[in-house]
Amino acid sequence: MSFLDETGSDLLLGNEAIARGALEADVACVAAYPGTPSTEVTETLSKYAKETGVYVEYSTNEKVALEVATAFSWSNLRAMATMKHVGLNVAADTFMSLAYQGAVAGLVILTADDPGMWSSQNEQDNRIFGKFAGVPVLVPSDPQEAKDFTKIAFELSESIGAPVLLRSTTRVSHTRSPVTFSSLGENVRQGNRRKGTFKPDIVRFVSLPANAKKNHPKVLQRLDQAISFSRNHELNRLEGSGKVGVITQGVEYLYVKEAERDLGTQLNILKLGMVYPLDKELIVEFAKQLDVLLVVEELEPFLEEMIKAILYEAGLSVPVHGKDVLPRVDELNYWKVRNALERILNLPVTEPQIAQVPSLPPRPPVLCPGCAHRNVFYMVKKTERKSVKPSDIGCYTLGALDPLKAIDTCIAMGASVGLGSGMAKAQEERVISTIGDSTFFHTGLPALVNAVYNRSKLTLIVLDNRITAMTGHQPNPSTGITASGDIGAHLDIEQVARGLGVDYVKSVDPYDLQALEEAIKEANEYTVAVIVAKQPCALLRQRQLQRRGERAPLYAVEEEKCTGCRVCVNLLGCPALVFDRDKKKVSIDEDLCAGCSACAQVCPYNAIYEKSIEGEKNFDVVSDESRARWQQWYTTLF
Amino acid sequence: MAAVVYNIVLTGVGGQGILTAAKVLGKAAMMAGYYAAVGEIHGLAQRGGSVIGFVRISENPVASTVPEGTADLLLSFEPLEAIRYINYAKKGTTFIVNEAKMVPVSANLGSTVYPSLEEIRKNLEEFGPCHMFDATALAKSLGSTIYVNSVMLGKSASVLSFLLPKEVIEKALEEVLPRDLENNLKAFDLGYQVS
């Protein structure tokens, strides 16, 4: 079974299904900034970019991604922008105005929301964004619908001339289940990269106030047209019968079905595929049959509030339940939905038999062995104990945890620099911020300009591992490779900082702790300082070395010299360092060690040595040879 | 199929190949004619942290999350992680547990203590049968810890034979891990033969 087969079915991840749906819709462009749980859509498409002729790009941020996709739509080529829920906040400026101007060829914006915050800083409900902008919102329940709805979203967008928001959640995007394929789009099948044509239309495309005034009523007209479209395409579906009604959507629908089965009851279900705009007539006709109605939806009472207003307007008094019996925070699940149904059905509420988890050593995610972020955080904590330490979104947010604890804040992409710039003024003290390379290019840049312009006493350490690591190693401007694997420009962050007028710019190898310490101290003498800590993502590097049949040097502990002081463990918290409680010695797990040598550098008894040199133990770990090797890892990774 | 839905919970440490194993079981279920829903968590939650994945095998579409207190099989790639997700177990859950410990940083720092294997086994056996063995050692006998997931899949094939024939799981393994297939199949067999 191949992903580009014309027929058949396969076990697909929800995000792979969305990618497949886009190919069936004959998409011409997909632009994205990676973000969990949205990433695999573009990751999948990037693999097939060459074969299908689809233009796939990782844009520097979500706003740019939406603009690139819009450009294709306005050039009469179907396009999609994909992002995680908070990515739409970044794209919102364009998104809100785009709703007035509309789409030419189908334009779909995927927002992958994260109820339960598995890998996010909030669980905002982006269905509200669709309503806010006046853009139709489709919500699939499972991978099959994710594929089908993607295709329908393109048709809807094109037929009414509006961008369409496709809203997935973690439990749809990251569920793998059987998906039946339909045929691929004509151009995709032939691998045909088409050329677009933009036809100027000043009233439509130039948002001067006078033009925008003409465009606003069109937003409302398109929403009316979306209702007719939803009826023709059966986006909203009726199931079952009886006096007990449930209106639901998304993965919540599957919880309702499972609870219905286990309770042995018959529900009258309206399953919505298009959650905005709501089909008022459909809701009223449905509610007329009922004695009671339960709205089952995760997070905000988005449907519930609209439905209550619709029923009030229609003079219907059927009781409507929703957030009175279901929580407004976190994901829903089988038990929450079943218990809510039991309550409105006046059945005894089943207490699930759930075993108590005893108190255990916690295992939060940690920085990988050999991750250079660890070294930076260790050194930041050592040298800048008193400074405020804003950080950002990425693997390195883990620097907030024990034992590193070298991060004070994390709000949103790029905020380490803006907050750092402001903290320096508010506290009248030097601030030390940390940010990753991808995040630096995403939204760190304008904030750095701000710090330079306003003369904030800020040291910014860019943790340049040459990849967007947390989301699974997508390339960015520091990588120098594009989404489709072509050679792009490698933007050197040191040069960028110099170009912006930063007072002190230095690149250092974070594996060399002494060099790192000197740079941080030296930076304190200048107003705005940027230190670029260059060392590739250890996880990726280890994989690459393995593929080439090489391996990084191993480190080991000389047992007689180890006093069991645990300085290495307490300062670095590297997962490869194992402390034996009985022997009171530290050892290094050879399967995990990635050869960064940080432990050897911090050991006060010089008890850790490089093992790889045959016949001798090398206790002098930062040799010229090591420096050359680390340098080579950075420059030849891609 | 015995129940309407057969619920499998897979746990372990990020990087052990748990999601790959889940995908193999899901594929096998689909090949055997069932509906399969595999639940995964990606991104930040993976980095060396505690990981949970789900496989649900059923006749009809279901959500991919196993409800707490309903696991038929709990496959843990690391002993401590079996206990961490005991809330998914019920009376009669079968456990397959890799007994090779991976000590979390918190226990190395001395703030908490890693329980003994005996304590862990006792705790699990209160619910159902527990197959505990060193899957990591078996994987290493083939040259790398990378084969742990195939070893674990092999053992689960011996437990799941009433639902999924061994050959079907092997076929699914072939599709998911075509690279280095020979060693993965060897690892699968080593796991299958564990008593």
Image (spheres, helix red, strand yellow):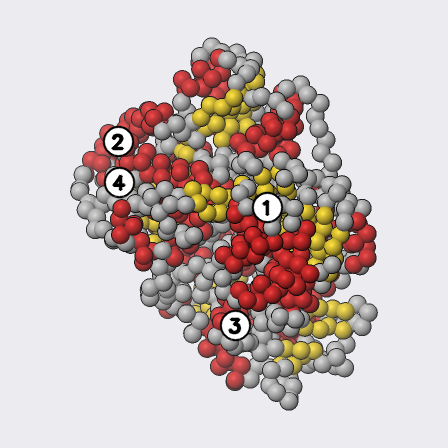
x 72%, y 31%: residue: A351
Q: Which mark is residue A546?
A: 3
Marks 4 and 3 close (CB-CB < 8 Å): no
Dot 3 or dot 2: first in sequence order is 2
Q: Which residue is mark 1?
A: B55
- Residue bearing mark 2: A215
Chain bearing mark 3: A
**Label 4 vs label 2: CA separation?**
18 Å
Which one is earlier in the sequence, the residue at label 4 or at label 3?
A: 4
- Depth check, mark 4 against mark 2: the one in front is 4
In this picture, residue B16 sits left or right of residue A234 = right
Element on which disc 1 rests = strand
> Which residue of the protein is positioned furthest toward the top in this rendering?
A315
Residue drawn 75% across the image and 43% down it: B92
Given the image, what chain letter belongs to the residue carrying mark 2? Answer: A
Residue flagged by tag 2: what amino acid is it?
Asn
Let me know if residue A400 appears in the view: no
Disc 4 marks a residue whose amino acid type is Ala
Q: CA distance from mark 4 to mark 3?
A: 45 Å
Q: Secondary structure at mark 3?
A: helix
Verify CB contact (< 8 Å) between mark 3 and mark 2: no
Q: To which residue does mark 4 refer?
A: A105
Occupied quadrant, residue A229: top left
Relative image position of residue A300 (x, y in whole percent): 52, 31
Q: Quadrant of residue A160?
A: top left
Residue B102 to residue B32: above or below:
below
Evaluate whether label 1 is on the same chain as label 2.
no
Measured as percent of width and height from the top left, residue B156 is found at 65, 53
| Picture layout, residue A111 above or below residue A371 | above
Secondary structure of the residue carrying tag 4 is: loop
Residue at x 58% of width, y 63% of height? B185
In the image, A580 versus B39, the foreground residue is B39
